[in-house]
Image (cartoon, rainbow, N blue to C red):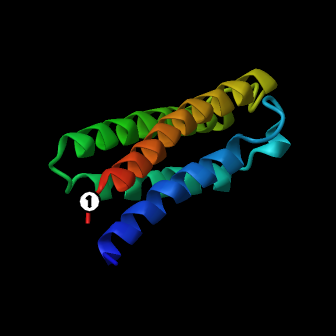
Amino acid sequence: MNPEKVVFGFFIVLALTLNFGFFVGELDNPNHHHAWELFAVVVVNMIATVLKFGDRTQMGAVLLSTSLVAMLQLIAATLLWTFALYATDAGLTESVMASIVSLSGGAMIANVVSVTLLVIETVMLRR
């Protein structure tokens, strides 16, 4: 067993599961989506992205691109949340929360693609 592949797979799957945990709930209800959970999703996705930089294959390039898409959407969601809380008088409204969760959903799709590609790559490995 290759410990590097275990860590790599662990963070890719953890990114997906944390993202799913944040995404689940009523779309516009801030009580169903916690800021610390979004923070954890961003941190784990950053770690997964950094781990993907070492792979020089075509599959590695596609995995990195999916991770970059997820990071872009998660950072946009985080900036939107921060802006809503600290730069507007309205605060965290239902429509803003719906946008944040929607961005997280887009990142979750990118993470699903990443996990799917990881499974395909694993199945295609020959011993």
Specify the amino acid type for callout 1. Arg
Residue 12 vs residue 33: left or right? left
Q: Looking at the image, can residue 83 be seen? A: no
Who's the residue at 43% across and 40% down the image? 71
- Up the image or down, 74 lies above or below 50; here it is above
Q: Residue at x 57, y 57 (%)?
A: 40
Tell me if residue 53 comes above or below residue 106 in the rendering.
Answer: below
Q: Is residue 106 visible?
A: yes
Left or right of 92 in this view: 60: left
Q: Is residue 3 left or right of residue 45?
A: left
Residue matched to label 1: 126
Please tell me which residue lies in front, 114 or 69: 114
Question: Which of these two is toward me, 9 or 101?
Answer: 9
Which quadrant holds residue 65? top left
User: Where does the C terminus fall, quadrant-wise?
Assistant: bottom left
Front position in the image: 81 or 103 = 103
Total tally of numbered discs in the picture: 1
Rate crowding at label 1 as few (under 14), some (14 to 19) or many (20 or more) other CA atoms within 10 Å: few
Vertical position of residue 3 compared to residue 121: above or below = below
Q: Furthest-front residue in view?
A: 127
Residue 37 picture quarter: bottom right
**Image spot of residue 126 (x, y percent):** 26, 59
Q: Residue at x 45, y 51 (%)?
A: 45
In the rendered image, the quadrant that contains the N terminus is bottom left
- Tell me where residue 43 appears, x and y as whole percent: 48, 56
SS state under label 1: loop
